[in-house]
Amino acid sequence: MAKMLPSLLLLLLALLPAAARADDGYRLWLRYDPIESPQRALYSRAASELVVEGDSTTIAAARSELVRGLSGLLGRPQPVAQRVDRDGAILLARRAVPTGEEGYVIRSTRVNGHAATLIAANGDRGLLYGAFAYLRLLQTRRPVAHLAIADAPKLGLRLLDHWDNPDRSVERGYAGQSLWDWQKLPGWVEPRYTDYARANASIGINGAVLNNVNAQADILTAPWLAKVKALADTFRPWGIRVYLSARFTAPMELGGLKTADPLDPQVRAWWKAKADEIYRLVPDFGGFLVKANSEGQPGPQDYHRSHADGANMLAEALAPHGGTVFWRAFVYAAAADKDRAKQAYEEFTPLDGKFAPNVVLQVKNGPIDFQPREPFHPLFGAMPKTPLAIEVQVTKEYLGFATHLAYLGTMWEEVLKSDTYRPRAGTPVAKTVTAMAGVANVGSDRNWTGSQFDQANWYAFGRLAWGPLGSADAIAEEWTRMTWGNDPRLVQRIGAMMASSRQAVVDYMTPLGLHHLMGTGHHYGPAPWVGNLERPDWNPTYYHRADANGIGFDRTATGSNAVAQYAPEVAARFASLDTVPDDYLLWFHHVPWDYRLHGVATVWETLLSHYDRGVARVALYEQDWAALQGRVEPERHAEVTAFLRIQHREARWWRDASIAYFQSVSKRPLPPGTAPPAHDLAWYEAQTFTHVPGH
């Protein structure tokens, strides 16, 4: 009887009506509320019983999720049987299927003479992913008759990178403290850690880096590794391996060595011993993530060694255990070059083919730093002998933190589908990478991500890491149906808001290819006037280069020639004013204020129209969301309403401050009908913020 209690409690919780539960967003997209009649009866007949073969911890997780989901969605306890003995059974079982290690098939078939649905995979993780995929069909009200689904991840490694610190602060985090309560681990493992793992498994994420890339060496000591083990044990049934960010000088800080030179035999021996120690505790440890020789972090160049030397030393320690080194390509030299956008390419392309097989070079989506819009990074396709991972930022460091609605699926789709022309036309970024990493937006807030809509970015990251050529709009609809409901009016309105939201942020923050105009350090709010920081490339003025004559960064052959780092076909498109997309005009070109786009409006007039369009779009979101009152639970509706109000106010702040500054530089009058900023430039420049989260 005691063993039955957890299952009974699970069923009772699943059967509770939605109104009886606090609906604050905690359940994310795994909301298994009863399906409306008569559709529920159709689904019930297709789930008359559940039969599960096998008894591993991962199969047990898949079984528990199916019981939880089907019981909730169908409004009754899900029958579980030992064998298929009636029509409408669901059979979860290992079978030889052509979908690889993690893929699955879901097909309508006959078992023991009965009509049944088979969820099959070669391995346990495939069964887990198949279970979630079947539940997703019900949640989104898709047909479950005549099924013939075969799906598998296109990328083998799909990781969330947590920039979490030992004191529970989160760099660039806007959702409360770190999810990991390190002080209580390993003695107390919060149930929430299992829910985190469930959410990740449901979208195919199979790895989590637990600590900040600006790492502290202590994470590699025995007391901390015991805490890591507790999390790894919790995540393992859900197909998730843990990784750690490693500090390059750990052999000196922890081992008492006089150097961290990657070619020093004692240093190499220290890392091998440390890897052995970790794998004794966590046999499926994923490996290390390393930020080296970037923003003050130590690395191999401190010892006149290359990035390949440093990465390969760690790879050597991990290789016997099957571990991977993720080596970040986000670097820029201690002495500022004339164009920071070129530096990663210049440092890493000479090293192509020199990295060990278990090293993955982790490259940001764009060449600067997670801006609202950037062209794709020129390293994609340029290192054919080196495995690459694309790194995106799920947390919104540069897109309004948690309070601005900005669905990033459209950003990532734009990058992933960009044609690199390497080695030939028709080679999108998605086909040049073997892994995808996302800087997590998860924290201790009850709704996980700091806002209801930021959950969509977590969801979209997982779905695009699984299928990097997927449709952001289709993913948004899927998430909306699972998170908010299947009411057609609700699905249409929310989908339209999400589809345009990232462009709205670009419009009121960084239109036409402007970039890095945010406040110093915290990146909160506009600061295009800042030009007095220690490094030139820390200043917004370095990036926009506006003066009385024009605006923009010349990256053509007459400037830094950063366009030359792309394939010739891409470079030619970006380099010509006739063919460069408007979205990248000021990224690649310095043009006069009176330059006319497409022979119509001037750059000055176009900038102003973008600022106004962005603000107007947010005002429309407020109206659209207000129209959904009564169709969304009051608590979540009120939160989104408040956040849209904040976004509208801050969008106008961005618009007004940017216009005030660029008008002061350009000496251009405002066209008739353009509202002047609410304050003068001095007022905007005087604003200071000392309690901004995440930095």
Image (cartoon, rainbow, N blue to C red):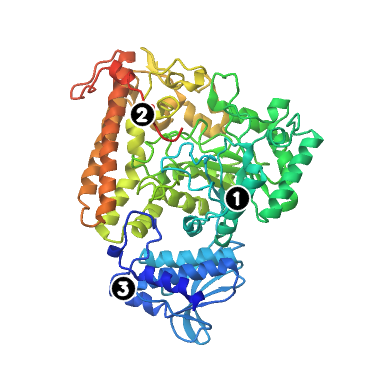
Q: Quadrant of residue 244?
A: top right
Residue 594 in view of the camera:
no
Task: Mark 2 or mark 1: name the one nearer the start of the chain.
Answer: 1
Tag of residue 525: 2
Residue at 60% from the left image edge and 50% from the top image edge: 228
- Residue 349 on image: x %, y %: 65, 32
- The kind of residue on which mark 1 rests is Val
Instruction: Read off the residue under disc 3.
Output: 39
The local secondary structure at tag 1 comes to: helix
- The kind of residue on which mark 3 rests is Gln
- The kind of residue on which mark 2 rests is Gly
669 or 25: nearer the eye?
Answer: 25
- Which numbered mark, 3 or 1, is in the foreground of this view? 1
Residue 334 in view of the camera:
yes
- Which numbered mark, 2 or 1, is in the foreground of this view? 1
Question: Most extreme residue toward the left, as rendered?
Answer: 673
Q: What is the spatial separation of the Cα atoms under label 2 and label 3, in whole angstroms?
A: 48 Å
Tag of residue 228: 1
Mark 2 crowd level (few <14, some 14–19, many ≥20, 10 Å Cα): many
Q: What is the spatial separation of the Cα atoms under label 3 and label 1, in whole angstroms?
A: 45 Å
459 or 559: nearer the eye?
Answer: 459
Q: Is residue 599 above or below residue 103?
A: above
Q: Are marks 2 and 1 in contact (CB under 8 Å)?
A: no
Q: What is the spatial separation of the Cα atoms under label 2 and label 1, in whole angstroms?
A: 36 Å
Task: Mark 3 or mark 1: name the one nearer the start of the chain.
Answer: 3
Residue at 38% from the left image edge and 45% from the top image edge: 450
